[in-house]
């Protein structure tokens, strides 16, 4: 078990110890930095808990493990924000490099993780027919990708993967800003109280700290007295933002920031990536954002803006719109500003107007803060930032 979790020996051995001893609590929290494999650990816990033969090795062929590997186990649900566009883009890249069925599982899982967020059982408010159609199509396409009869040459698999990626990115646009509205948390807790047809139920809440207080309170009720056979696995990269009352109800298992060499190993073994030693986070960013040629224009424009050099704001806005297709606008603007900053030495004022540099740098930081802290539309903010220089001398 946990063969697919790399470089998290302490957390994994504590979990395995508790699983084998039958002492794993029904409510747990996996905390640790981003890109440290928390979500993978949560999925593995769910699979091992429901394995029919009790051993839970990755190649187990029991009915339950087979469904888990396809992320189709009916008594398993996962909620919360993730960088779905990145997950999907990277696993699609992996399949394009290596179209064997084992790799296609990785891709299908990343797409079904997204699809799970639209599970009609936990819908809040009225359904959206367009979303339902997308969802149905996506599930059909992922089924056919896992078909054992699908021949493996890249020429056959690649167009199918491209089609699924574009359908999935359409679905990403329908993700809500708040992944944990209180009504949904109540729907989850009600569902957890109905006995499952297949034994244990597992609920995973990713980035659980993003729950508002009212949602945390609703969850707390079920954490205080979890129904028999139901497990709640919370994951968080910012556990300090989780209420103490919730924290006091969960046993914590912590992942660590993996060393660069270990991350290189993860890239090679999980994603078939070789020759990239910049770490997981940079790789994710490069594949999802940096792959677009609009992104280079975006970074160049921001750099010119800060330095007070001439640039074409219309072209920059157009580049932003191209680069933002299917990715999170906030992540995009933060990444572009970081990359733009690399080309600017704020203390080197030779041949630059020091005041312009300071003022524009401050302006850029303030706009980014608005986007990240106050959830303001990234495209509109970007446009207003770039056009703000028109009034300047
Ligand atoms: Zn099994």
Image: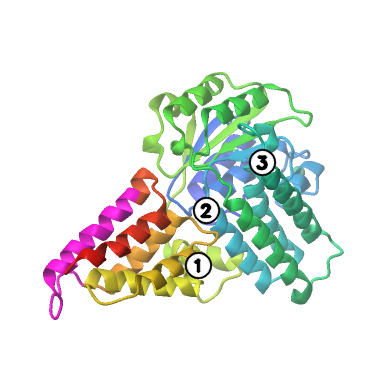
Query: x and y percent of residue 252 in the render?
Result: 47, 35
- Whole-angstrom CA distance, mark 2 to mark 1, is 18 Å
Q: Quadrant of ligand 1?
A: top right
Label 3: element kind:
loop
Q: Tell me which corner region of the image, top left, top right, bottom left or bottom right, holds residue 184.
A: top right
Please tell me how crowded label 2 is: few (under 14), some (14-19), or many (20+) other residues with Cα within 10 Å: some
Mark 1 — residue?
A: 322
| Quadrant, the C terminus | bottom left
Q: Is mark 2 within 8 Å of ligand 1?
A: no
Please tell me how crowded label 1 is: few (under 14), some (14-19), or many (20+) other residues with Cα within 10 Å: some
Q: Residue lying farthest right?
A: 149
Query: Observer-nearest residue: 266 or 348?
Result: 348
Q: Is tag 2's residue or tag 3's residue first in the polypeptide sequence? A: 2
Which is closer to the viewer, label 2 or label 1? 1
Q: In this image, 270 relative to 9: left or right?
A: right
Query: Observer-nearest residue: 181 or 89?
Result: 181
Q: In this image, 26 relative to 372: left or right?
A: right
Q: Is residue 272 visible?
A: yes
Q: Is residue 298 visible?
A: no
x 48%, y 75%: residue: 293
Mark 3 — residue?
A: 128
* Tag 2 and tag 1, C-beta contact below 8 Å: no
Mark 2 — residue?
A: 83
Query: x and y percent of residue 119 in the render?
Result: 67, 39
């Amino acid at each position: 078990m946990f063969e697919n979790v790399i470089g998290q020996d302490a957390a994994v051995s504590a979990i395995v110890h508790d699983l084998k001893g039958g002492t794993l609590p029904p409510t747990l929290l996996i905390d640790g930095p981003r890109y440290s494999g928390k979500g993978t650990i949560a999925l593995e816990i769910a699979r091992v808990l429901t394995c029919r033969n009790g051993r839970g090795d990755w190649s187990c062929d029991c009915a339950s493990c087979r469904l888990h590997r396809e992320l189709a186990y009916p008594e398993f649900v996962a909620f919360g924000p993730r960088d779905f566009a990145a997950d999907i883009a990277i696993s699609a890249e992996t399949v394009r490099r290596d179209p064997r069925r084992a790799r296609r599982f990785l891709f299908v899982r990343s797409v079904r993780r997204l699809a799970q967020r639209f599970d009609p059982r936990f819908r809040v408010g009225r359904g959206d027919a367009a979303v339902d159609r997308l969802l149905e199509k996506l599930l059909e396409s992922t089924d056919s990708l896992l078909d054992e009869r699908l021949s493996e040459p890249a020429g056959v698999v690649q167009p199918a993967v491209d089609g699924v990626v574009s359908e999935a990115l359409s679905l990403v646009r329908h993700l809500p800003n708040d992944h944990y509205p209180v009504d949904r948390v109540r729907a989850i807790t009600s569902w957890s109280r109905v006995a499952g047809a297949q034994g244990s139920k597992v609920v995973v809440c990713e980035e659980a700290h993003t729950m508002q207080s009212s949602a945390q309170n609703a969850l707390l009720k079920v954490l205080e007295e979890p129904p028999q056979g139901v497990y709640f696995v919370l994951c968080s990269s910012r556990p300090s933002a989780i209420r103490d009352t919730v924290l006091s109800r969960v046993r914590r298992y912590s992942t660590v920031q993996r060393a660069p060499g270990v991350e290189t190993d993860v890239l090679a073994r999980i994603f078939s990536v070789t020759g990239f030693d910049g770490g997981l986070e940079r790789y994710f960013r490069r594949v999802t954002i940096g792959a677009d040629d609009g992104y280079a224009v975006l970074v160049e424009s921001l750099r010119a803006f800060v330095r007070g050099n001439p640039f074409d704001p219309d072209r920059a806005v157009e580049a932003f719109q191209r680069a933002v297709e299917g990715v999170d606008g906030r992540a995009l603007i933060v990444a572009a500003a970081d990359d733009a900053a690399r080309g600017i030495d704020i203390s080197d004022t030779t041949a630059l107007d020091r005041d312009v540099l300071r003022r524009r740098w401050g302006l850029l930081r303030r706009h980014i803060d608005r986007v990240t802290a106050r959830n303001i539309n990234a495209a509109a903010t970007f446009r207003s930032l770039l056009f703000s220089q028109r009034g300047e001398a």
